[in-house]
Image: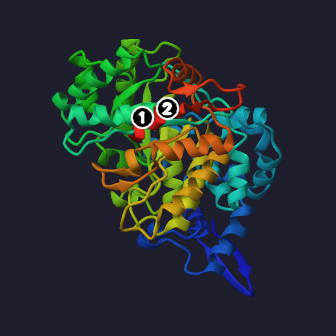
Amino acid sequence: MGYQHSVNGQRFIFPDLPALFARASPLRSGDQLAGIAAASASERVAAQCALADVPLADIIARPLIPYEADEVTRLILDTHDRAAFAPIASLTVGGFRDFLLAAGAETLAALRPGLTPEIAAAVSKIMRLQDLIAVAAKCHLTTAFRNTIGLPGRISVRLQPNHPVDDPHGVAASTLDGLLLGAGDAVIGVNPATDNVAATTTLLRMLDDIRARYDIPTQTCVLAHVTTTLRCIEAGAPVDLVFQSIAGTEAANRGFGINLALLAEARDAALSLRRGTVGNNVMYFETGQGSALSANAHHGVDQQTIEARAYAVARHFSPLLVNSVVGFIGPEYLYDGKQIIRAGLEDHFCAKLLGLPMGVDVCYTNHAEADQDDMDSLLTLLAVAGVTFIMGVPGADDVMLSYQSTSFHDALYVRGVLGRAPAPEFAAWLERMGIADAPATDTIPPRMTPALIGLHDG
Protein backbone atom coordinates (compact mmCIF):
# COMPACT_ATOMS: atom_id res chain seq x y z
CA MET A 1 0.00 0.00 0.00
CA GLY A 2 1.51 3.31 -1.07
CA TYR A 3 0.98 6.91 0.05
CA GLN A 4 1.26 10.08 -1.98
CA HIS A 5 0.88 13.83 -1.81
CA SER A 6 1.62 16.76 -4.10
CA VAL A 7 3.49 19.95 -3.19
CA ASN A 8 3.86 22.84 -5.64
CA GLY A 9 2.65 20.65 -8.46
CA GLN A 10 5.14 17.85 -7.76
CA ARG A 11 3.77 14.49 -6.69
CA PHE A 12 5.69 12.46 -4.12
CA ILE A 13 5.05 8.76 -3.63
CA PHE A 14 5.94 6.80 -0.50
CA PRO A 15 5.83 3.03 -0.92
CA ASP A 16 5.03 2.01 2.66
CA LEU A 17 4.65 3.26 6.23
CA PRO A 18 8.35 3.03 7.17
CA ALA A 19 9.24 5.19 4.16
CA LEU A 20 6.45 7.64 4.95
CA PHE A 21 7.50 7.93 8.59
CA ALA A 22 11.14 8.48 7.62
CA ARG A 23 10.43 11.13 5.00
CA ALA A 24 8.04 12.94 7.38
CA SER A 25 10.65 13.25 10.14
CA PRO A 26 12.15 16.68 10.68
CA LEU A 27 15.67 16.77 9.29
CA ARG A 28 18.34 14.93 11.25
CA SER A 29 21.73 13.65 10.27
CA GLY A 30 21.10 10.09 11.43
CA ASP A 31 18.29 9.54 8.94
CA GLN A 32 20.48 11.06 6.24
CA LEU A 33 23.28 8.67 7.21
CA ALA A 34 20.83 5.77 6.93
CA GLY A 35 19.72 6.94 3.49
CA ILE A 36 16.05 7.22 4.47
CA ALA A 37 15.56 10.98 5.01
CA ALA A 38 13.53 13.20 2.72
CA ALA A 39 15.63 14.52 -0.14
CA SER A 40 14.14 18.01 0.09
CA ALA A 41 11.94 20.21 2.22
CA SER A 42 9.17 19.75 -0.33
CA GLU A 43 9.31 15.98 0.02
CA ARG A 44 9.27 16.32 3.80
CA VAL A 45 6.17 18.52 3.71
CA ALA A 46 4.47 16.12 1.29
CA ALA A 47 5.23 13.21 3.60
CA GLN A 48 3.91 15.09 6.64
CA CYS A 49 0.70 15.92 4.80
CA ALA A 50 0.28 12.31 3.70
CA LEU A 51 1.04 11.06 7.20
CA ALA A 52 -1.58 13.40 8.67
CA ASP A 53 -4.21 11.56 6.63
CA VAL A 54 -3.21 8.05 7.77
CA PRO A 55 -5.76 6.43 10.11
CA LEU A 56 -4.34 5.49 13.50
CA ALA A 57 -5.85 2.03 13.08
CA ASP A 58 -3.68 1.48 9.98
CA ILE A 59 -0.53 2.13 12.01
CA ILE A 60 -1.50 -0.64 14.42
CA ALA A 61 -2.53 -2.99 11.62
CA ARG A 62 0.71 -2.53 9.65
CA PRO A 63 3.70 -2.89 12.02
CA LEU A 64 6.79 -1.07 10.82
CA ILE A 65 8.93 -4.01 11.97
CA PRO A 66 7.30 -7.44 11.46
CA TYR A 67 5.72 -9.15 14.47
CA GLU A 68 7.50 -12.44 13.85
CA ALA A 69 10.93 -10.78 13.50
CA ASP A 70 11.12 -8.65 16.64
CA GLU A 71 10.20 -9.17 20.29
CA VAL A 72 9.70 -5.42 20.84
CA THR A 73 7.01 -5.42 18.15
CA ARG A 74 5.42 -8.43 19.84
CA LEU A 75 5.50 -6.63 23.20
CA ILE A 76 3.88 -3.53 21.69
CA LEU A 77 1.06 -5.41 19.98
CA ASP A 78 0.47 -8.07 22.64
CA THR A 79 0.05 -5.46 25.38
CA HIS A 80 -2.02 -3.00 23.33
CA ASP A 81 -5.27 -2.13 25.11
CA ARG A 82 -7.95 -1.87 22.44
CA ALA A 83 -10.57 -0.64 24.90
CA ALA A 84 -8.36 2.32 25.82
CA PHE A 85 -7.69 2.91 22.11
CA ALA A 86 -11.40 2.96 21.22
CA PRO A 87 -12.00 6.71 21.83
CA ILE A 88 -9.46 7.59 19.13
CA ALA A 89 -9.80 4.54 16.88
CA SER A 90 -11.55 6.50 14.14
CA LEU A 91 -9.02 9.35 14.03
CA THR A 92 -6.26 10.06 11.56
CA VAL A 93 -2.82 11.19 12.68
CA GLY A 94 -3.83 14.79 11.97
CA GLY A 95 -7.08 14.38 13.86
CA PHE A 96 -5.17 12.90 16.77
CA ARG A 97 -2.97 15.99 16.94
CA ASP A 98 -6.07 18.17 17.28
CA PHE A 99 -7.44 15.78 19.91
CA LEU A 100 -4.24 15.98 21.98
CA LEU A 101 -4.15 19.75 21.97
CA ALA A 102 -7.74 19.93 23.25
CA ALA A 103 -7.63 17.00 25.71
CA GLY A 104 -7.27 17.35 29.46
CA ALA A 105 -4.81 15.56 31.70
CA GLU A 106 -7.27 12.88 32.83
CA THR A 107 -8.20 12.04 29.25
CA LEU A 108 -4.54 11.71 28.26
CA ALA A 109 -3.82 9.48 31.26
CA ALA A 110 -6.69 7.14 30.40
CA LEU A 111 -5.48 6.92 26.82
CA ARG A 112 -1.96 5.64 27.62
CA PRO A 113 -2.58 1.86 27.42
CA GLY A 114 -4.23 2.33 24.02
CA LEU A 115 -1.29 4.15 22.47
CA THR A 116 1.57 2.50 20.63
CA PRO A 117 4.99 4.13 20.22
CA GLU A 118 4.45 4.35 16.47
CA ILE A 119 1.29 6.40 17.01
CA ALA A 120 3.14 8.75 19.36
CA ALA A 121 6.02 9.08 16.91
CA ALA A 122 3.70 9.67 13.96
CA VAL A 123 1.80 12.52 15.58
CA SER A 124 5.02 14.12 16.86
CA LYS A 125 6.26 14.42 13.27
CA ILE A 126 3.46 16.83 12.36
CA MET A 127 3.67 18.91 15.54
CA ARG A 128 5.57 22.13 16.03
CA LEU A 129 7.66 22.66 19.16
CA GLN A 130 4.94 24.47 21.05
CA ASP A 131 2.57 21.56 20.37
CA LEU A 132 5.07 19.09 21.81
CA ILE A 133 5.49 21.29 24.88
CA ALA A 134 1.78 22.02 25.39
CA VAL A 135 0.72 18.37 25.31
CA ALA A 136 3.64 17.04 27.36
CA ALA A 137 2.93 19.63 30.06
CA LYS A 138 -0.48 18.00 30.57
CA CYS A 139 0.98 14.51 31.02
CA HIS A 140 1.81 13.67 34.63
CA LEU A 141 3.21 10.42 35.98
CA THR A 142 4.34 9.80 39.54
CA THR A 143 6.84 7.11 40.59
CA ALA A 144 8.44 6.39 43.94
CA PHE A 145 11.22 4.57 45.77
CA ARG A 146 12.55 6.55 48.76
CA ASN A 147 10.94 9.74 47.52
CA THR A 148 8.19 10.71 45.10
CA ILE A 149 9.18 11.70 41.58
CA GLY A 150 7.10 13.53 38.97
CA LEU A 151 4.56 15.50 40.97
CA PRO A 152 3.24 18.63 39.22
CA GLY A 153 5.23 21.76 39.96
CA ARG A 154 8.44 19.88 40.67
CA ILE A 155 11.62 18.98 38.81
CA SER A 156 14.18 16.48 40.06
CA VAL A 157 17.91 16.15 39.40
CA ARG A 158 20.08 13.12 38.91
CA LEU A 159 23.32 13.87 40.72
CA GLN A 160 25.98 12.46 38.36
CA PRO A 161 29.33 12.37 40.23
CA ASN A 162 31.35 10.45 37.65
CA HIS A 163 35.10 9.99 38.01
CA PRO A 164 37.59 8.91 35.30
CA VAL A 165 39.08 6.13 37.46
CA ASP A 166 36.12 5.47 39.82
CA ASP A 167 38.00 6.96 42.78
CA PRO A 168 35.52 6.77 45.68
CA HIS A 169 36.95 9.97 47.21
CA GLY A 170 36.41 11.85 43.95
CA VAL A 171 32.89 10.49 43.60
CA ALA A 172 32.14 11.44 47.22
CA ALA A 173 33.44 14.99 46.72
CA SER A 174 31.24 15.51 43.67
CA THR A 175 28.29 14.03 45.54
CA LEU A 176 28.75 16.52 48.37
CA ASP A 177 29.03 19.32 45.81
CA GLY A 178 25.69 18.34 44.31
CA LEU A 179 23.87 17.83 47.60
CA LEU A 180 24.90 21.28 48.81
CA LEU A 181 23.29 22.73 45.69
CA GLY A 182 20.04 20.78 46.02
CA ALA A 183 20.73 18.04 43.47
CA GLY A 184 20.18 14.32 43.91
CA ASP A 185 16.47 13.77 44.45
CA ALA A 186 16.02 11.75 41.25
CA VAL A 187 19.01 9.53 42.01
CA ILE A 188 22.67 9.74 42.93
CA GLY A 189 23.87 7.82 39.90
CA VAL A 190 27.45 7.04 38.86
CA ASN A 191 28.52 5.85 35.41
CA PRO A 192 31.38 3.49 36.29
CA ALA A 193 34.57 3.73 34.29
CA THR A 194 35.13 0.01 34.94
CA ASP A 195 32.16 -2.34 34.61
CA ASN A 196 32.93 -5.17 37.02
CA VAL A 197 31.46 -6.48 40.26
CA ALA A 198 34.30 -5.31 42.52
CA ALA A 199 34.34 -1.70 41.31
CA THR A 200 30.56 -1.51 41.17
CA THR A 201 30.17 -2.91 44.69
CA THR A 202 32.74 -0.46 46.09
CA LEU A 203 30.81 2.49 44.67
CA LEU A 204 27.44 1.07 45.72
CA ARG A 205 28.58 0.65 49.33
CA MET A 206 30.17 4.11 49.46
CA LEU A 207 27.04 5.82 48.09
CA ASP A 208 24.77 3.84 50.39
CA ASP A 209 26.93 4.79 53.38
CA ILE A 210 26.55 8.49 52.50
CA ARG A 211 22.81 8.11 52.02
CA ALA A 212 22.33 6.24 55.30
CA ARG A 213 24.68 8.47 57.35
CA TYR A 214 22.78 11.62 56.45
CA ASP A 215 19.37 9.92 56.16
CA ILE A 216 18.91 11.25 52.62
CA PRO A 217 15.50 10.37 51.15
CA THR A 218 16.78 9.41 47.73
CA GLN A 219 18.09 6.39 45.85
CA THR A 220 21.52 5.46 44.57
CA CYS A 221 22.62 3.64 41.45
CA VAL A 222 25.83 2.56 39.76
CA LEU A 223 25.02 2.41 36.06
CA ALA A 224 26.76 -0.87 35.34
CA HIS A 225 25.43 -3.42 32.85
CA VAL A 226 22.38 -5.27 34.12
CA THR A 227 24.30 -8.55 34.33
CA THR A 228 26.91 -6.90 36.57
CA THR A 229 24.18 -5.52 38.81
CA LEU A 230 22.57 -8.95 39.07
CA ARG A 231 25.88 -10.38 40.25
CA CYS A 232 26.18 -7.53 42.76
CA ILE A 233 22.72 -8.36 44.11
CA GLU A 234 23.73 -12.01 44.45
CA ALA A 235 26.83 -10.91 46.39
CA GLY A 236 24.74 -8.84 48.83
CA ALA A 237 25.57 -5.35 47.57
CA PRO A 238 23.12 -2.54 48.48
CA VAL A 239 21.37 -2.13 45.12
CA ASP A 240 18.48 0.35 44.99
CA LEU A 241 17.89 0.67 41.23
CA VAL A 242 18.81 -1.58 38.34
CA PHE A 243 20.09 0.41 35.38
CA GLN A 244 20.22 -0.51 31.70
CA SER A 245 20.49 1.24 28.34
CA ILE A 246 17.70 0.04 26.07
CA ALA A 247 16.68 0.46 22.44
CA GLY A 248 13.61 0.02 20.26
CA THR A 249 14.40 -3.21 18.43
CA GLU A 250 15.28 -6.73 19.51
CA ALA A 251 18.48 -6.62 17.47
CA ALA A 252 19.63 -3.33 19.02
CA ASN A 253 18.93 -4.65 22.51
CA ARG A 254 20.90 -7.76 21.63
CA GLY A 255 23.79 -5.41 20.87
CA PHE A 256 23.43 -4.10 24.42
CA GLY A 257 23.60 -7.69 25.67
CA ILE A 258 19.99 -7.77 26.87
CA ASN A 259 16.52 -9.03 26.07
CA LEU A 260 13.13 -8.68 27.71
CA ALA A 261 13.54 -11.84 29.78
CA LEU A 262 16.80 -10.57 31.28
CA LEU A 263 15.23 -7.24 32.22
CA ALA A 264 12.36 -9.09 33.90
CA GLU A 265 14.84 -11.20 35.87
CA ALA A 266 16.68 -8.07 37.01
CA ARG A 267 13.50 -6.32 38.08
CA ASP A 268 12.40 -9.34 40.11
CA ALA A 269 15.81 -9.47 41.78
CA ALA A 270 15.68 -5.78 42.75
CA LEU A 271 12.12 -6.08 44.03
CA SER A 272 13.14 -8.99 46.22
CA LEU A 273 15.49 -6.68 48.17
CA ARG A 274 12.55 -4.52 49.36
CA ARG A 275 14.75 -1.44 49.79
CA GLY A 276 12.16 1.15 48.78
CA THR A 277 10.35 3.00 51.55
CA VAL A 278 7.58 4.92 49.75
CA GLY A 279 7.36 2.93 46.51
CA ASN A 280 8.73 -0.01 44.55
CA ASN A 281 9.73 1.39 41.16
CA VAL A 282 13.20 -0.18 40.89
CA MET A 283 14.31 0.23 37.26
CA TYR A 284 16.26 3.05 35.60
CA PHE A 285 16.54 3.11 31.80
CA GLU A 286 18.44 5.32 29.37
CA THR A 287 17.73 5.69 25.68
CA GLY A 288 18.92 7.85 22.79
CA GLN A 289 18.10 8.51 19.15
CA GLY A 290 20.60 6.78 16.88
CA SER A 291 21.51 3.79 19.05
CA ALA A 292 19.76 1.29 16.77
CA LEU A 293 21.29 2.80 13.64
CA SER A 294 24.77 2.66 15.18
CA ALA A 295 24.19 -1.08 15.73
CA ASN A 296 22.80 -1.56 12.20
CA ALA A 297 19.60 -2.73 13.86
CA HIS A 298 17.03 -0.16 12.73
CA HIS A 299 15.24 -2.20 10.02
CA GLY A 300 15.07 0.86 7.77
CA VAL A 301 12.91 2.75 10.28
CA ASP A 302 13.75 6.35 11.20
CA GLN A 303 15.65 6.96 14.41
CA GLN A 304 12.97 8.93 16.20
CA THR A 305 10.37 6.19 15.74
CA ILE A 306 12.86 3.55 16.89
CA GLU A 307 13.54 5.72 19.94
CA ALA A 308 9.82 5.84 20.74
CA ARG A 309 9.67 2.05 20.52
CA ALA A 310 12.25 1.88 23.32
CA TYR A 311 9.64 3.53 25.53
CA ALA A 312 7.42 0.47 25.15
CA VAL A 313 10.25 -1.61 26.59
CA ALA A 314 10.68 0.83 29.46
CA ARG A 315 6.95 1.12 30.17
CA HIS A 316 6.62 -2.64 30.52
CA PHE A 317 8.89 -2.64 33.59
CA SER A 318 7.36 0.29 35.53
CA PRO A 319 10.62 2.24 35.99
CA LEU A 320 11.34 4.92 38.55
CA LEU A 321 13.27 6.93 35.95
CA VAL A 322 13.83 7.01 32.19
CA ASN A 323 15.93 9.50 30.31
CA SER A 324 17.01 10.20 26.78
CA VAL A 325 20.70 11.12 26.49
CA VAL A 326 19.61 13.18 23.55
CA GLY A 327 22.87 14.69 22.25
CA PHE A 328 25.31 12.13 23.63
CA ILE A 329 25.58 9.75 20.67
CA GLY A 330 27.04 12.49 18.48
CA PRO A 331 26.58 14.67 15.38
CA GLU A 332 26.34 11.63 13.11
CA TYR A 333 22.80 11.27 14.47
CA LEU A 334 21.89 14.79 15.67
CA TYR A 335 24.12 17.25 13.86
CA ASP A 336 23.58 20.57 15.58
CA GLY A 337 21.77 22.44 18.32
CA LYS A 338 18.58 22.77 16.28
CA GLN A 339 18.36 19.01 15.74
CA ILE A 340 19.19 18.27 19.38
CA ILE A 341 16.51 20.67 20.64
CA ARG A 342 13.86 19.17 18.38
CA ALA A 343 14.83 15.61 19.29
CA GLY A 344 14.82 16.33 23.02
CA LEU A 345 11.30 17.73 22.89
CA GLU A 346 10.11 14.84 20.68
CA ASP A 347 11.55 12.25 23.05
CA HIS A 348 10.01 13.92 26.08
CA PHE A 349 6.61 14.27 24.41
CA CYS A 350 6.44 10.67 23.17
CA ALA A 351 7.56 9.21 26.50
CA LYS A 352 5.19 11.31 28.58
CA LEU A 353 2.30 10.54 26.24
CA LEU A 354 3.01 6.82 26.62
CA GLY A 355 3.18 7.12 30.40
CA LEU A 356 6.82 7.29 31.42
CA PRO A 357 8.59 9.32 34.15
CA MET A 358 10.74 10.98 31.52
CA GLY A 359 13.88 12.99 32.04
CA VAL A 360 16.33 14.29 29.46
CA ASP A 361 20.08 14.58 29.62
CA VAL A 362 20.39 18.02 28.02
CA CYS A 363 23.74 17.40 26.43
CA TYR A 364 26.08 17.49 23.46
CA THR A 365 29.49 16.18 22.47
CA ASN A 366 32.35 18.53 21.75
CA HIS A 367 32.40 17.70 18.03
CA ALA A 368 28.72 18.62 17.51
CA GLU A 369 27.65 21.97 16.07
CA ALA A 370 26.11 22.98 19.40
CA ASP A 371 27.00 25.01 22.46
CA GLN A 372 25.76 25.82 25.93
CA ASP A 373 23.34 28.45 24.61
CA ASP A 374 21.55 25.65 22.74
CA MET A 375 21.44 23.63 25.96
CA ASP A 376 20.04 26.58 27.91
CA SER A 377 17.26 26.82 25.33
CA LEU A 378 16.47 23.11 25.48
CA LEU A 379 16.64 23.04 29.28
CA THR A 380 14.16 25.90 29.56
CA LEU A 381 11.78 24.43 26.99
CA LEU A 382 11.85 21.02 28.66
CA ALA A 383 11.21 22.52 32.07
CA VAL A 384 8.19 24.38 30.68
CA ALA A 385 7.05 21.06 29.20
CA GLY A 386 7.22 19.44 32.64
CA VAL A 387 10.31 17.28 32.30
CA THR A 388 10.57 14.90 35.25
CA PHE A 389 14.30 15.29 35.85
CA ILE A 390 17.55 16.54 34.38
CA MET A 391 21.23 15.84 35.03
CA GLY A 392 23.43 17.57 37.56
CA VAL A 393 27.08 17.29 36.56
CA PRO A 394 29.88 19.24 38.30
CA GLY A 395 30.57 22.25 36.10
CA ALA A 396 28.33 20.73 33.38
CA ASP A 397 31.43 18.91 32.06
CA ASP A 398 31.52 15.16 32.60
CA VAL A 399 35.19 14.30 33.11
CA MET A 400 34.65 10.56 32.64
CA LEU A 401 32.26 10.43 29.68
CA SER A 402 33.76 13.55 28.04
CA TYR A 403 30.58 15.36 27.08
CA GLN A 404 28.74 18.53 28.07
CA SER A 405 25.57 18.35 30.15
CA THR A 406 23.78 20.48 32.74
CA SER A 407 25.25 21.59 36.05
CA PHE A 408 23.90 21.84 39.59
CA HIS A 409 23.56 25.59 39.02
CA ASP A 410 21.51 24.97 35.87
CA ALA A 411 19.01 23.07 38.00
CA LEU A 412 18.87 25.96 40.48
CA TYR A 413 18.23 28.33 37.57
CA VAL A 414 15.29 26.42 36.21
CA ARG A 415 13.79 25.74 39.62
CA GLY A 416 14.03 29.41 40.49
CA VAL A 417 12.78 30.89 37.23
CA LEU A 418 9.83 28.54 36.85
CA GLY A 419 9.05 28.05 40.53
CA ARG A 420 9.74 24.31 40.55
CA ALA A 421 10.59 22.39 43.71
CA PRO A 422 12.52 19.17 44.31
CA ALA A 423 10.73 15.95 45.27
CA PRO A 424 8.79 16.68 48.49
CA GLU A 425 10.69 14.32 50.78
CA PHE A 426 14.01 15.63 49.47
CA ALA A 427 12.89 19.25 49.78
CA ALA A 428 12.04 18.62 53.42
CA TRP A 429 15.50 17.07 53.94
CA LEU A 430 17.20 20.11 52.38
CA GLU A 431 15.36 22.32 54.81
CA ARG A 432 16.10 20.05 57.78
CA MET A 433 19.81 20.02 56.95
CA GLY A 434 19.95 23.80 56.59
CA ILE A 435 20.86 23.55 52.91
CA ALA A 436 17.71 25.35 51.79
CA ASP A 437 15.22 27.68 53.41
CA ALA A 438 11.62 26.59 53.75
CA PRO A 439 9.42 27.59 50.80
CA ALA A 440 6.79 30.23 51.36
CA THR A 441 4.14 27.98 49.78
CA ASP A 442 3.96 24.47 48.38
CA THR A 443 4.34 25.84 44.86
CA ILE A 444 7.55 27.78 45.46
CA PRO A 445 10.85 25.88 45.55
CA PRO A 446 13.11 26.07 48.60
CA ARG A 447 15.65 28.90 48.46
CA MET A 448 19.26 27.79 48.81
CA THR A 449 20.75 29.08 52.04
CA PRO A 450 23.23 31.86 51.12
CA ALA A 451 25.69 30.96 53.86
CA LEU A 452 26.02 27.38 52.64
CA ILE A 453 26.34 28.41 49.02
CA GLY A 454 29.05 30.86 50.05
CA LEU A 455 30.82 28.10 51.96
CA HIS A 456 30.58 25.87 48.90
CA ASP A 457 31.97 28.55 46.60
CA GLY A 458 34.83 29.14 48.99
Assess disc 1: are there few (<14), some (14-19) or many (≥20) residues with their C-alpha within 10 Å of its C-alpha. Answer: few
Assess disc 2: are there few (<14), some (14-19) or many (≥20) residues with their C-alpha within 10 Å of its C-alpha. Answer: few
Q: What residue type is labelled 1?
A: Leu
Q: Residue at coordinates 53% horizontally, 62% vertically from top-left?
A: 374
Residue 186 visible: no
The front one of 9 and 428 is 428
- Across and down, in percent, residue 210 comes to 33, 21
Label 2 sits on residue: 451
- State left or right for residue 264 relative to residue 11: left
Is there a contact, CB below 8 Å, between mark 1 and mark 2? Answer: yes
**SS assignment at label 2:** helix
Q: Residue at coordinates 73% horizontally, 81% vertically from top-left?
A: 7
Q: Residue at coordinates 53% horizontally, 43% vertically from top-left?
A: 411
- Across and down, in percent, residue 289 comes to 46, 56
> Which quarter of the rendered picture does the C terminus lie within?
top left
Up the image or down, 270 lies above or below 344; here it is: above
**SS assignment at label 1:** helix
Residue 335 visible: yes
Q: How far apart are marks 1 and 2 (CA)?
A: 6 Å
Q: In which quarter of the image is residue 443?
A: top right
- State left or right for residue 88 relative to residue 386: right
Q: Residue at coordinates 38% horizontally, 36% vertically from top-left?
A: 177
The front one of 320 and 117 is 320
Q: In which quarter of the image is residue 148?
A: top right
The front one of 271 and 375 is 375
Residue placed furthest toward the right: 102
- Across and down, in percent, residue 159 comes to 42, 36
Name the disc covering residue 455, or none.
Answer: 1
